[in-house]
Image: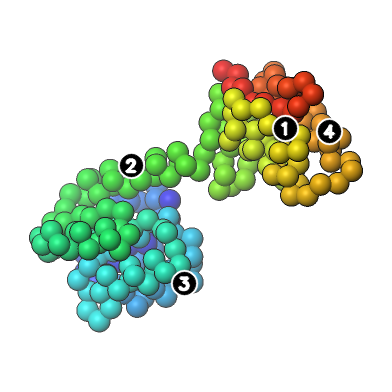
Amino acid sequence: MKILVVDDEARIRDLICDYLHKEKYTTMEAENGEEALALFEKEGDFDLIILDVMMPETDGWTVCREIRKTSDVSIFMLTARVDTSDEVYGFELGVDDYIKKPFSPRSLVARVQSLEKKKQGRDILDAGAISVNKIGRYAMLEGKKLDLPPKEYELLLLLIENRGRALSREQILDSVWDFQYYKGMRTIDTHIKKLRKKLGDHANCIETVRNFGYRFEENL
């Protein structure tokens, strides 16, 4: 994950980044709220922001509110305050976690790792020997990347997202190709044939539902 660490104390930024680097995370730093907002606007692809509440001029709450106008990026708030109303306010703003100073760097890293696992659970679909990475838009078969053109990838993703459910050819056409045309049904069958060939020994994951369409069933 790519993480933005925002704190006006350099020693705290250094401490957090050192521990994150040990776990192979990529980090960027900002020493105040204005710098954080500028970096966020410039980079735009952070997976997590670790954000101090009490900073001069633009505080963490303001940064959080501004970011939440356009993004649902995960945010961990850091604070030395012990008022529980602050914690409630943070969650109302859309904060994902609340960490009180002084904190254990190892505990912070554990929370980051837990967040990463949750993100992977949403972004990666596992179906037996096959997995689909929705963020990277690629599929793996037994740990090896499949060479799939866009429509084959979208077709496989649709089938896996609806595993165990029979999808009609009309449903597949509307979802993957977005429109109807006279060669549509033949196009679906051709793409299914190509997918099965690339799945090799796992081709039977894609079952034909006679006179209807197709269904995906996991093949362990």
Residue 74 coordinates in the image, percent (x, y): 37, 56
Label drawn at residue 190: 4
Residue underneath mark 2: 114
Q: In the figure, 161 relative to 134: above or below?
A: above
Please tell me how crowded label 3 is: few (under 14), some (14-19), or many (20+) other residues with Cα within 10 Å. few
- The answer to which of marks 2 and 1 sits earlier in the sequence is 2
Residue occupying the far bottom of the picture: 57
Residue underneath mark 3: 41
Look at the image and tell me whether residue 32 can be seen. no
Residue at left offset 34%, top offset 43%: 113
| Distance (Cα) linking label 4 and label 2 | 41 Å
Residue 106 coordinates in the image, percent (x, y): 23, 45
| Distance (Cα) linking label 4 and label 3 | 43 Å
Which residue type carries mark 3?
Answer: Glu
Please tell me how crowded label 1 is: few (under 14), some (14-19), or many (20+) other residues with Cα within 10 Å. some
Report the label total. 4
Which residue type carries mark 2?
Answer: Ser
Residue at left offset 42%, top offset 59%: 72
